[in-house]
Amino acid sequence: MNTTILENNQTNTYLENGIVYPSNNVMLDLVHLKKVYPTPKGDYIVLEDLNLQIMKEEFVTIIGHSGCGKTTMLSMIAGLNNISGGAISVLGKHIKGPGPDRGVIFQAPSLMPWMTALENVLLGVNQVFPHVNKSQRRDIAKYYLQKVGLEEAFNKKATELSQGMQQRVGIARAFAIKPKVLLLDEPFGMLDSLTRGELQDILIEIWNKEKITAVMITHDVDEAIFLADRVVMMTSGPKANIGDILNIDFERPRTRKAVLEHDDYYKYRKHLIDFLEH
């Protein structure tokens, strides 16, 4: 049997009988991914031959111009959008639709407006942990609501919460189901800059503890750098692909002040802006 170790995007892969397989360290694997939408004028190819490996416990941010297929790719990973070609796998298992192994935080938190903050988080917890007793499920929901600073709002209905508080519920709900992969689609895009900064800090604080593999779409270059281990840059569509990948070598846990004062910060920032402007 002919087996050779290869280096690929910081990942050990092995080549066996002419086929490249990911190592056990790969959490999320996108292989020759393609998305096509039929139109009256012919097929519109959003993504074509896109390949990306994301490691266990890695935080990856994805940037690119509007319309480049970022959200399409994320929705395919979530199992909410059919795959036209290629495959997506989590820990080597091909996804075939939505599942509790993937938690999603959307730009709009999509809460049930007539339910309380606690009840909204419990929706997912009750589905994923049916074998756990009711009291323990409530404890799980309360724990993550406390983590996002909503210990005083357990029993407030979603309609009584500000937009920023609703997004905190969305973050708590996603972490509470203990997914293998956390998918974030511009979760702070609709918030003011102060609230955005607060929620970035909350997100990264919980992530530092939970170490769930995270993939986040953002249009904000500074957000991309602050949160990520790697920033993936997508080319403009149609037929979008991975244009470049930037490794962010800041130590964790990291603070905003330390990031802004780091010698490499503006080098990273310039790299991303130069890519977006070309």
Image: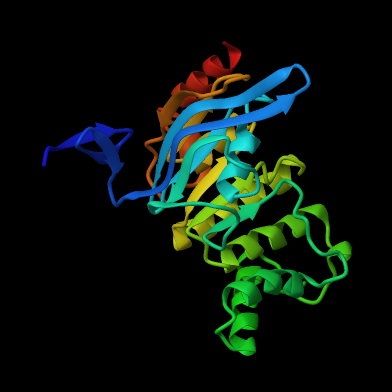
Residue 244, percent from left and from top: 45, 23
In the image: residue 108, left or right of residue 78: right
Q: What residue lies at 59% left-to-right and 43% top-to-bottom?
A: 76
Residue located at (65% from left, 37% from top): 71
Q: Is residue 88 above or below residue 103?
A: above
Q: Is residue 181 above or below residue 16?
A: below
Coloring basis for residues: rainbow
**Relative to 191, is 24 on the left or the right?**
left
Q: What is the count of numbered marks? A: 0
Q: Quadrant of the C terminus?
A: top right
In this view, the residue in front, 252 or 2, is 2
Query: Where is residue 266 drawn, in percent x and y?
Result: 48, 24
As rendered, which of 270 and 37 lies closer to the eye? 37
**Residue drawn at (62%, 42%) of the image:** 82
Residue 152 visible from this viewpoint: no
- Can you see residue 180? yes
In x, y percent, where is residue 114?
88, 69
